[in-house]
Amino acid sequence: MTTLHYKILLRKEDDGTYTVIVPSLPGCLTFGHTVEEALEMAKEAIEGFIECMIARGEEVPIETDDAIICTVAVEANA
């Protein structure tokens, strides 16, 4: 078994929960009521997502350490 590492994004929601997004695995997301719960849920979601990819014969993305996550400001009439 191989250990894979994925960067995740935790976003605090208005209701106090945390949404987890896995940028390298589009469509893989979950949530938790606390940061700790969100991290545990992230592990479970990633494991399940990868299992499904393997079952469908899809190639599992391997995340590299060269990814950069930035915040960009834009002007909008929102």
Image: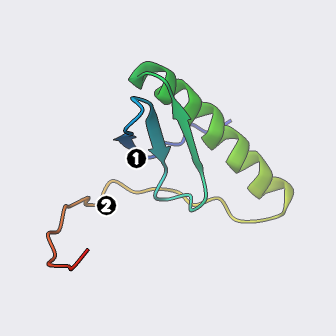
- For the residue pair 1 and 34, the one nearer the viewer reads as 34
- Residue 55 at x, y = what percent? 85, 54
Mark positioned earlier in the residue sequence (2 or 1): 1
User: Distance from label 2 to label 1 (Cα)?
Assistant: 9 Å
- Residue at the image position 44 percent from the left and 30 percent from the top: 17
- Residue 75 at x, y = what percent? 14, 78
Q: Amino acid at mark 2?
A: Ala
Which element carries disc 1, helix, strand or loop? Answer: loop
Vertical arrangement, residue 34 with respect to residue 51, above or below: above
**Image position of 31 (left or right of 75):** right
- For the residue pair 15 and 45, the one nearer the viewer reads as 15
Kindly indicate whether the residue at mark 1 contacts the one at mark 2 (C-beta within 8 angstroms): yes
- For the residue pair 71 and 49, the one nearer the viewer reads as 71
**How many numbered marks appear?**
2
- Residue at the image position 75 percent from the left and 57 percent from the top: 53
Res. 64 image quadrant: bottom left
The residue at which mark 2 appears reads as 67
The residue at which mark 1 appears reads as 7
Tell me the crowding category of disc 2: few under 14, some 14 to 19, or many 20 or more residues within 10 angstroms, Cα based.
Answer: few
**Image position of 48 (left or right of 14):** right
Vertical arrangement, residue 3 with respect to residue 70, above or below: above
- Residue at the image position 56 percent from the left and 58 percent from the top: 25
